[in-house]
Structure formats: structure tokens, C-alpha cells
């Protein structure tokens, strides 16, 4: 026959009922904790300071998958494309694009302004977005432009289309762009 008092002392360091209830209260069961909007903002700031997803998850007492879910929100509303401006494996700036209304929304995921898509600008305009795309692409005035476009299979100079083909890579830096398009519903 098992001596449950001895087992409780082995496992929990006590056999006191009040202390065991406190320990049981600290153990979570059931549904995972969700984050408040303030928590999500703090998680984004923590990521911007270079904290890993694992450390952020530990801070909030949730899994890495839960933190990733909040940090990588799907496209909503009229935003039909998301561009993740990356440095190595880290998202530096999320750019949400609404082509119909010519609007963008960004979320900077780093405090390093040199790695952000728009530097110090927190509310870039559509013109800033177009300039950003052209800066990541070869110049429109480039010699042999038509030959280059034919070689990559693009009919006209469209920086966004060109960047989608080469992931926004340039020879000068280690940054690139991941593209996500909102899926259209088929009827």
C-alpha cells in the first residue's frame, strides 16, 4: 500500500494540506491564457528590443505558438498584401498594403532604424511606399532595362512585381521581403 503523505513530501516538499492547495492553485489547467491588447503591444515592443519569441512566451506564461499567433496576425479588412521586411530570420517591419485606397499600415518590429523599412517614419504615405519599392529594385532608368525585364519575365517596369520575383533582395544589404497575399474566397 502506498504512503501518500510520503509521496506528497517527495513530490511537493510538504504534506501540509493548505500548502498543497496553494501549489495546486499555481498549476494551470484547461484553456491557454490569451493576451490583452496591452500585452500584445508589450510583446511587440519586447520583440523590437531583440527578445526571442521563447523569452516573450515565458514572460507572459504562454506557449511560443501563442506568442507567434499574436505577433503574426493574418491580413484583415481592405489590406490585401503583407510584406515582411526581414533581416536574416527576423521581421523588422510588417507592411500591410491596401491597393484600392492606396494606403499602408506598418508595424515596426525592431528599434534599429537602419533595419526598418521606413527608418524613423512611423506613418509612411503611399508615396513613401512606392519609393521604398523602387529603392529595393533596379532603377527605372537602367541601361538594358527591357532586356532585364524580358529575362525575368516581366512585361513592364513594375517594382512590386520585380520584388516579388527576387524577394526584394539587393546586393548592398542582408535584408529581403516575404510576401503574403490575402486569399480570395471562391464562390
Image (tube, grey):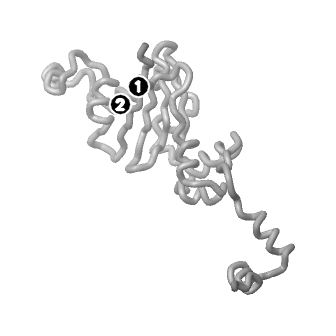
Q: CA distance from mark 2 to mark 1?
A: 6 Å
Q: Residue at x 55, y 43 (%)?
A: 69
Q: Position of residue 39 (x, y in %)?
A: 68, 46
Q: Can residue 120 be spotted in the picture?
A: no
Position of residue 61 relative to residue 141, above or below, is below
Rendered residue at 26%/19% (across/down): 157
Task: Indicate the secondary structure of the residue bearing disc 2.
Answer: helix
Q: Mark 1 falls on what kind of element?
A: helix
**Of 35 and 102, the residue lying toward us:** 35
Q: Are marks 2 and 1 in contact (CB under 8 Å)?
A: yes
**Residue sticking out furthest to the front:** 1
Residue 9 occupies which quadrant of the picture?
bottom right
Q: Nearer the viewer, residue 124 or 17?
A: 17
Q: Position of residue 83 (x, y in %)?
A: 43, 32
Residue situated in front as seen by the camera: 152 or 9: 9
Name the quarter where the N terminus is drawn: bottom right
Which numbered tag is attached to residue 135?
2
The residue sitting at 53% across, 19% down in the picture is 78
Q: Is residue 62 above or below residue 20?
A: above
Residue 131 image label: 1
Circle 1 crowding by C-alpha within 10 Å: few under 14, some 14–19, many from 20? some
Amino acid at each position: 500500500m502506498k504512503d501518500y503523505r510520503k509521496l506528497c513530501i517527495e513530490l511537493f516538499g510538504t504534506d501540509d494540506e493548505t500548502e498543497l492547495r496553494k501549489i495546486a492553485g499555481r498549476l494551470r489547467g484547461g484553456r491557454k491564457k490569451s493576451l490583452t491588447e496591452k500585452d500584445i503591444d508589450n510583446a511587440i515592443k519586447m520583440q523590437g528590443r531583440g527578445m526571442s519569441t521563447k523569452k516573450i512566451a515565458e514572460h507572459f506564461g504562454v506557449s511560443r505558438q501563442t506568442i507567434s499567433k499574436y505577433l503574426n496576425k493574418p491580413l484583415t479588412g481592405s489590406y490585401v498584401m503583407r510584406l515582411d521586411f526581414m533581416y536574416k530570420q527576423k521581421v523588422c517591419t510588417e507592411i500591410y498594403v491596401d491597393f484600392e485606397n492606396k494606403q499602408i499600415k506598418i508595424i515596426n518590429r525592431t528599434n534599429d532604424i537602419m533595419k526598418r523599412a521606413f527608418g524613423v517614419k512611423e506613418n509612411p504615405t503611399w508615396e513613401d511606399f512606392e519609393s521604398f519599392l523602387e529603392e529595393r529594385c533596379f532603377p527605372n532608368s537602367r541601361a538594358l532595362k527591357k532586356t532585364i525585364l524580358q529575362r525575368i519575365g516581366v512585361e513592364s517596369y513594375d517594382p512590386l512585381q520585380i520584388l516579388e520575383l527576387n524577394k526584394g533582395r539587393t546586393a548592398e544589404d542582408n535584408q529581403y521581403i516575404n510576401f503574403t497575399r490575402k486569399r480570395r474566397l471562391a464562390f
